[in-house]
Image (spheres, grey):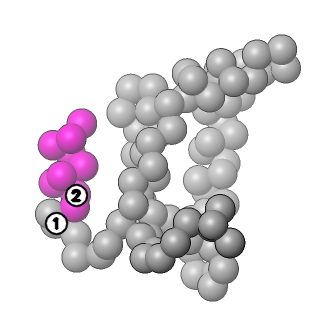
Amino acid sequence: TPLLISSFLLCCSLKVAIKGINLKELHDAYVGYKVSQKAVERLVKTETKILKILRDHPNIVRLEDSFRIKSTCFLVMEYIDGSDLLEH
């Protein structure tokens, strides 16, 4: 996994932030809601498609790429320098 991510970053001239979403852990967070693992996977896939559609929106962080390794979905997003939104 680190090799794949490192290779991407070395080939890419963009500054990016990579977010890993463990689908199994996300499913476990829905305990009590009767949500299937497949439904969680579809949710993440749908959200990724929406981010790709809104790629050029000025108020949304750009999704450059996404990929999955086993039960983890990785989102490669535009890196925005500055403070965390929680600080505002």
Seen in the picture, residue 84 relative to 27 is either above or below; the reply is: below
Seen in the picture, residue 63 relative to 34 is either above or below; the reply is: below
Q: Residue furthest front?
A: 87
In percent of width and height, residue 10 lies at 14, 63
What is the three-letter code of the residue carrying label 2? Phe
Seen in the picture, residue 52 relative to 55 is either above or below; the reply is: above
Q: Residue furthest bottom?
A: 58
What crowding class fits label 2: few (fewer than 14 Cα within 10 Å), some (14-19), or many (20 or more)? few
Q: Residue at x 68, y 72 (%)?
A: 88
In percent of width and height, residue 34 lies at 82, 16
Q: Which mark is residue 8?
A: 2
Callout 1: helix, strand or loop?
helix
Callout 2: helix, strand or loop?
helix
In this picture, which residue range is highlighted in magenta? 1-9
Name the side, left or right, on which 28 lies relative to 14. right
Name the side, left or right, on which 84 lies relative to 36. left
In percent of width and height, residue 26 lies at 62, 28
Circles 1 and 2: CB atoms closer than 8 Å: yes
Magenta highlight: main SS = helix
| Label 1 sits on residue | 11
Give whichever of 48, 15 is nearer the camera.
15
Give whichever of 52, 88 is nearer the camera.
88
What is the three-letter code of the residue carrying label 1? Cys
